[in-house]
Image (cartoon, helix red, strand yellow):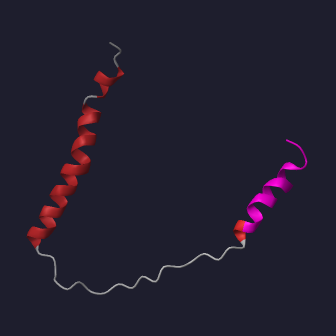
């Protein structure tokens, strides 16, 4: 690397440092309706089916993927 590399990199990123970053105005409110036990059970079950089931299937068949045909 040459001696000019840090100066060139600093020149490229310098203007980006001075830009103002907009901040989101997020305010939370209490829920209109409390979640029931059935709602929570349905949510957890759908998360399990959507995320953990496919990844578990891939992990259980990992040896099949390693074999070359």
Vertical comparison of 6 with 56: above or below: below
Vertical comparison of 10 with 20: above or below: above
Q: Position of residue 7 (x, y in %)?
A: 86, 56
Q: Residue at x 89, y 43 (%)?
A: 2
Q: Report whether 20 appears left or right of 45.
A: right
Image quadrant of residue 9?
Answer: bottom right
- In the picture, the quarter occupied by the C terminus is top left
Vertical comparison of 64 with 28: above or below: above
Q: Give the dominant element type of the magenta stretch: helix, strand or loop.
A: helix
Q: Position of residue 57 (x, y in %)?
A: 23, 36
Closer to the camera in the image, 37 or 39: 39
Q: Residue at x 17, y 63 (%)?
A: 43
Image quadrant of residue 10?
Answer: bottom right
Closer to the camera in the image, 39 or 4: 4
Q: Report whether 66 appears left or right of 19.
A: left
Identity of the residue furthest to the left in this view: 38
Q: Residue at x 56, y 78 (%)?
A: 22
Residue 43 lies in magenta, yes or no?
no
Report the span colored magenta: 1-15
User: So how many labels did they put on this image?
Assistant: 0
Vertical comparison of 55 with 50: above or below: above
Q: Position of residue 62 (x, y in %)?
A: 31, 28
Identity of the residue furthest to the right in this view: 3
Q: Position of residue 8 (x, y in %)?
A: 83, 54
Q: Residue at x 85, y 41 (%)?
A: 1
């Amino acid at each position: 690397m040459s001696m000019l590399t840090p100066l060139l990199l600093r020149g490229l990123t310098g203007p980006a440092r001075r830009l103002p970053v907009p901040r989101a105005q997020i305010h939370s409110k209490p829920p209109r309706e409390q979640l029931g036990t059935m709602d929570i059970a349905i949510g957890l079950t759908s998360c399990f089916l959507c995320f953990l089931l496919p990844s578990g299937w891939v992990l259980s068949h990992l040896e099949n993927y390693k074999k070359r045909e």
